[in-house]
Structure formats: structure tokens, C-alpha cells
Image (spheres, rainbow, N blue to C red):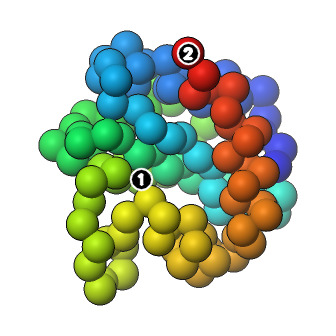
């Protein structure tokens, strides 16, 4: 995965903003899609998955934070926010964290080793 310097700066700022605005809620931030696969083109967006602890009601606020931080920057985020407590359902787009990493990511063209390496690469932003 290769993020542009401005994308990496945005991601670090976004993670810090989530932590500051929603203390104790952040479980995971992960880049997926064409950036994670190394297939991004000139106009590719930055697909970001955010998992919150018991924060289903905070989804729109977290996305708004990310989009506001991208204003005036050469970063086009596409942000998905899920609660780690989301119940399992049999519908597309409704899944728990484990299901996302296995089924959802494979549907987006990510293999398990890529997912795990992306998770390790982004760990810098999740450490306290």
C-alpha cells in the first residue's frame, strides 16, 4: 500500500481527531480498496474503515469529522463507520468486524494477507 504524503497526514490527523472527540471508542482504522491493493489511479479515493466501540450513534459525526479534515487538501476520503457491537445479519453491508475482514474484504478484492498487512501498517495510528 502506498499512500501519498498528504493522505498519510490526513489519516493521522483523522485518527487523532476521533480519539480526541470520542475517547475510548476507537477500535480500528483500516485503509482498503484500490489504495490498499496498490492499484490506485490518479483519481482514486481513499477508502477508510472505522470501527467504534458501542458507537453506532456516532457514525455520521465521525464521517463528518473526516470529510471536514479533508477540505482544502488533495485527499478524497470514502469513510465507512461501523460499531463493533453491530449484530450479525444476512444482508449486504451489515456485518460484524470479523465478517468484514473475511467476506467483505474478499468481495472488494483484498486477500487475508493484504488485510493483515494493512492492519499492521496502520497500527501506528492506533497505539496510545
Residue 35 in the image: above or below residue 108: above
Residue reaching furthest left? Answer: 57
Residue at screen point 45% across, 44% down: 50
Residue under pointer 1 = 80
Residue at screen point 56% across, 65% down: 101
Residue at screen point 16% across, 43% down: 57
Give the camera-side residue of 73 and 2. Answer: 2
Residue 83 in the image: above or below residue 109: above
Give the camera-side residue of 15 and 55. Answer: 55
- Residue 108 image position (x, y, % from top left): 61, 74
- Residue 38 image position (x, y, % from top left): 83, 58
Between disc 1 and disc 2, the foreground one is 2
Residue at screen point 78% across, 51% down: 117
Side of 95 where 102 appears, left or right: right
Side of 102 where 99 appears, left or right: left
Q: Please, what secondary structure does the residue beneath circle 1 have?
A: strand
- Residue 63 image position (x, y, % from top left): 35, 40
Give the camera-side residue of 54 and 104. Answer: 54
Amino acid at each position: 500500500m502506498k499512500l501519498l504524503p498528504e493522505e498519510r497526514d490526513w489519516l493521522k490527523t483523522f485518527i487523532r481527531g476521533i480519539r480526541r472527540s470520542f475517547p475510548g471508542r476507537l477500535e480500528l482504522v483500516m485503509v482498503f480498496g484500490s489504495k490498499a491493493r496498490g492499484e490506485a489511479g490518479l483519481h482514486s479515493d481513499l477508502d477508510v474503515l472505522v470501527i467504534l466501540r458501542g458507537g453506532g450513534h456516532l457514525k455520521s459525526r465521525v464521517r463528518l469529522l473526516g470529510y471536514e479534515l479533508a477540505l482544502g487538501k488533495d485527499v478524497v476520503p470514502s469513510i465507512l463507520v461501523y460499531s463493533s457491537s453491530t449484530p450479525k445479519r444476512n444482508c449486504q453491508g451489515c456485518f460484524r468486524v470479523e465478517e468484514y475482514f473475511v467476506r467483505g474484504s474478499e468481495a472488494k478484492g483484498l486477500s487475508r494477507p493484504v488485510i493483515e498487512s494493512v492492519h499492521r501498517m496502520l497500527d501506528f495510528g492506533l497505539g496510545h
